[in-house]
Each structure stands twice: as C-alpha cells, then as structure tokens.
C-alpha cells in the first residue's frame, strides 16, 4: 500500500492523539514519515464553529493540495465535532476528505481504504489507455479524469456527462465504456458500445431507432431490425445530446431505462436488454427540468453520476500540451517529436479564446499543420490569416478568464468577504511568482511590481 505523506500539524492537536493516530496508521500498513509524492494528511485541532475561523488551516490545505490537485485528508484531532459548514469550507480549500481522528483505529481504517482506492485510480489514470487519449495535467482536468475512472472501473451506475460543445464528452464516454467493459463479453466478443446521437433522431423513426421494428411494421419495413437497446445488450448505450429529445421520446425511454424491457415496433413480445447507460448533453438538464422542458423522472434515471467537463478556459495549462498532440497527429509525427512552437505562437495559443473548446483547438492546429513546411519550428507565418490579431494595442489580452470569475463566485457562496478574497488573490500571486522564479525574491518582486522588502514583509506577515 502507498505511503501517506504527513504534513505539519495545524492548530496544535494534542501530541498523544497525533501519536496514537500514527501508530494506528502503521498497523494498517500506512507509514507516515515519507516525503514521497502521493496522498497525504494534515492533522489539525481548532476551536469554535465558524467556517471562516481557519485562515491558516485553509492556506496550508491550499498549499499542500496545490489547490486541489493532490489528495490531502484533513484529520480533526481536537475536542468536539466540527460543524457542517467547516467540513464544506475545508473541502473548498482543497481537502479531499475531512474525518474525525479521535478514534485512531477507526480513522486509520478509513484512511487505509481511501488510499488503497486512490492508488488503484491513479494506476489507471497513469496507464497508456487513459494517458494517451485524455491529455492534460491541469487540476480541473485531472479531477475530471479521476472521477471518470472511478465511476467507470468501480461501479455500474449510469453516468451523465455535462459540458459545453467540444469539451470531449464522447471521448470520456468511450473511456467509461472501455474501463467498465474490460473482461466483459457478449457471444465471445468485446462488450459493445452503441452510440446514438439524439439530436439526429427523426421523431417519426424514433421508436425504430430505440426499440427496433418487425417486418411490415410500417411502410418500408421490409425486414426486422434491432434498435439501440437490443444492440447494447450486455454492453454500453451512449445517448449523445440526450437533452435534445422531445417530450414524447423522453416518455418512451423512461420505462426501458427503468425496467430494461421494451417491445419492437409492430411486435407483441417483451424483449430484455441489460446495458450500462451513459448520456451526454451540453444543456444544464436540472435547469431544463425546472422549466418543464425535460422530465424529472427521466433525469433522475440517467443522472446516477454526473461528470462535468471543464471548458478549455478552465484548463488553460493544457492548451500547449494539447496543441502539440494535435500538431503531431496532423503531421503524422510521433507525439514526442512535433515541431516546436515559436514563443509568439505559444503566447497566441494560450491567450486566444476558444468558444469551441478542445475541438476548436484541434481544428486550428490542423490548419496550422496544413500551412507548415520544412523541419523548422511553427512560426507566426504558419497561423491562418484570420488568426492574426488586428489592433493589438487596442485589444490587450484579457487575463481574467472565466476560471477567475468562477473562483470569486465560489468564495462569495461560502461567505468569504472582499478583504479575505483580496488577500488570497495577493498571496496566490506571490506564491506563483516566487515558485516560477525558483525562490529568487528579487526577480519575483520585479514581476509583482513591488519592492524586495515589501515582498519579504508580505511573506513574513502573511498580509
């Protein structure tokens, strides 16, 4: 079992409780004195009930978890129980879970079970099957990939994949099927994946598309035909753009999804089909339910687990790795050896908006590849004409993309005030600048537009 990295304690939990938990962890096969990367725990004690009373703890969680990129369990070793608001605030600060450590054996068993599951998930995430097809290391993308892997490999639940167009919903659905179906067969063959795009189904032919039909069921039905539910038996049925279904088709689907039984059009015998259901939509179906455009009973049948695909603006760290991958594909070169990107090209790709998300980035790199000649790097001359900025001075790049607004919105929902938001934004900028400059405070201060002494005082005082 993987080791557990122990972070410094916070709030001075009683030494006896810390030692008791460490001994219990060792008995469960979790040594806790390693600096190896991996899951970790942060033991803390705190008084009071207000969620906003733990700025130091929250900051340590953000640093230790790299704002949620690494899994850190917050273990409470103080007296009394934490209120529910504090649990949520710790999760928002980056904790993967919050547990009560006053019973050492119980806490150690919970931690051991979590670490074992996380190790299994991480092994799959790092496997070529996942790594070579779902490219990206940004925290938002890694959270999505981990969640998709866990849902696929450790459950049979239906999955609803929600996200903007071009974010990779179908690719994620195929991954869920592939991981879930390993070792599953139908008639000696790999379990099938049946894809049905609901936005292209004509209402008059929907019954045949879903359920199949008997010969002579309607004009043109010269032979019996299996529908999507029959074809997906013992496999996965992927309903893409399920939010586009009219009300009549929603009602038709409900019984089949619930009972796994249906009749062919023109037939009288009930047929059965056992399948895993994966749906995708670019609509917010809960909002569609609220306004009566989507059946609530169908929604709760298909939303066993919701996977929310991050937009490309929420994972900008992945733009250049994705661009290199798409460029290699377009030029038929090994993924590790595509042409280098000129700095100006990299800057353009990173700052450019992508309303079409990853799909738009792929198309752009294909267009660039078509213009590129020779063995040299990709230059600004390889950019299509409509990609070239006009009046650059009049339209400077906007660094406040939607991810920034999302973070502020989340803070406000948690009751964080303007003063704390401003302080956290400044502390984050300092941490990033110092990290990118390799700890050199003079260079970091120049980037931040402050004096060396001001930066030193800010770091020392945390204000």
Image (cartoon, grey):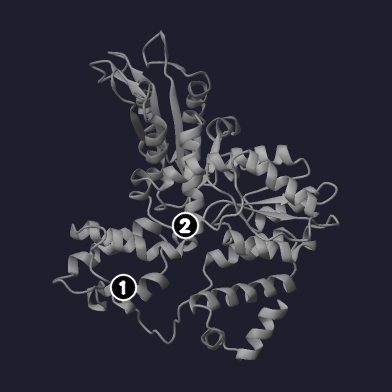
The picture places residue 238, in percent across and down from the top left corner, at 40, 34
Q: Residue at x 69, y 85 (%)?
A: 457
Residue that numbered label 2 is attached to: 311
Mark 2 and mark 1: Cα distance apart in space: 21 Å
For residue 387, above or below residue 301: below
Mark 2, Cα crowd under 10 Å, few <14 / some 14-19 / many 20+, is many
For residue 352, above or below residue 325: below
Q: Nearer the viewer, residue 47 or 187?
A: 47
For residue 182, above or below residue 62: above
Mark 1, Cα crowd under 10 Å, few <14 / some 14-19 / many 20+, is few
Q: Residue at x 48, y 40 (%)?
A: 120
Classify residue 86 as left or right of residue 182.
right
The picture places residue 295, in percent across and down from the top left corner, at 57, 33
The picture places residue 183, in percent across and down from the top left corner, at 36, 26
Q: Nearer the viewer, residue 379 or 228?
A: 379
Classify residue 339 as left or right of residue 281.
left
- The number of discs equals 2
Classify residue 406 as left or right of residue 415.
left
Secondary structure, mark 1, is: helix
- Quarter-of-image position of residue 34: bottom right
Q: Residue at x 30, y 59 (%)?
A: 325
Residue that numbered label 1 is attached to: 387
Q: Nearer the viewer, residue 9 or 373?
A: 9
Secondary structure, mark 2, is: loop
For residue 367, above or below residue 80: below
Classify residue 14 as left or right of residue 382.
right
């Amino acid at each position: 079992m993987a080791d557990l990295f122990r972070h410094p304690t916070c709030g001075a939990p009683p030494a006896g409780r810390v030692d008791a938990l460490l001994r219990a962890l060792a008995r469960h096969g979790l040594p806790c004195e390693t600096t190896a990367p991996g899951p970790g725990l942060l033991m803390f004690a705190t008084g009071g009930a207000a969620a906003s009373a733990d700025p130091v703890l929250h900051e340590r969680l953000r640093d230790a978890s790299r704002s949620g990129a690494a899994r850190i369990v917050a273990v409470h070793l103080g007296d009394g129980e934490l209120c529910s608001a504090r649990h949520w605030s710790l999760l928002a600060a980056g904790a993967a879970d919050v547990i009560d450590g006053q019973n050492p054996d119980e806490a150690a068993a919970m931690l051991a079970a979590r670490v074992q599951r996380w190790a299994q998930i991480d092994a799959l995430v790092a496997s070529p099957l996942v790594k070579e097809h779902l490219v990206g290391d940004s925290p938002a993308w890694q959270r999505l990939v981990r969640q998709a892997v866990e849902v696929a490999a450790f459950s049979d639940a239906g999955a609803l994949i929600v996200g903007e167009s071009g974010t990779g919903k179908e690719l994620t659905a195929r991954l869920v099927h592939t991981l879930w179906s390993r070792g599953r067969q139908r008639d000696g063959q790999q379990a099938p994946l049946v894809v049905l795009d609901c936005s292209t189904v004509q209402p008059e032919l929907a019954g045949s598309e879903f359920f199949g039909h008997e010969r002579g069921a309607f004009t043109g039905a010269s032979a019996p035909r299996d529908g999507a539910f029959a074809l997906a038996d013992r496999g996965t049925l992927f309903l893409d753009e399920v939010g586009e279904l009219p009300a009549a088709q929603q009602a038709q689907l409900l019984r089949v999804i619930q009972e796994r039984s249906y009749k062919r059009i023109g037939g009288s015998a009930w047929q059965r089909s056992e399948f895993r259901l994966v749906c995708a939509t670019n609509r917010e179906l809960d909002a569609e339910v609220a306004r009566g455009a989507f059946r609530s009973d169908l929604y709760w049948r298909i939303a066993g687990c919701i996977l929310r695909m991050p937009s490309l603006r929420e994972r900008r760290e992945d733009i250049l790795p994705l661009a290199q991958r798409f460029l290699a594909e377009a030029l038929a070169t090994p993924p590790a050896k595509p042409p280098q990107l000129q700095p100006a090209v990299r800057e353009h790709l990173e700052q450019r908006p992508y309303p079409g998300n990853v799909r738009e980035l792929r198309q752009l790199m294909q267009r660039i590849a078509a213009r590129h000649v020779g063995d040299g790097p990709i230059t600004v001359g390889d950019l299509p004409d409509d990609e070239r900025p006009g009046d650059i001075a009049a339209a400077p790049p906007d660094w406040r993309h939607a991810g920034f607004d999302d973070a502020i919105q989340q803070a406000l929902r948690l009751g964080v005030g303007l003063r704390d938001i401003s302080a956290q934004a400044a502390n984050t900028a300092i941490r990033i600048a110092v990290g990118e400059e390799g700890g050199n405070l003079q260079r970091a201060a120049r980037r931040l537009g402050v004096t060396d002494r001001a930066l030193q005082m800010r770091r020392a005082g945390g204000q």
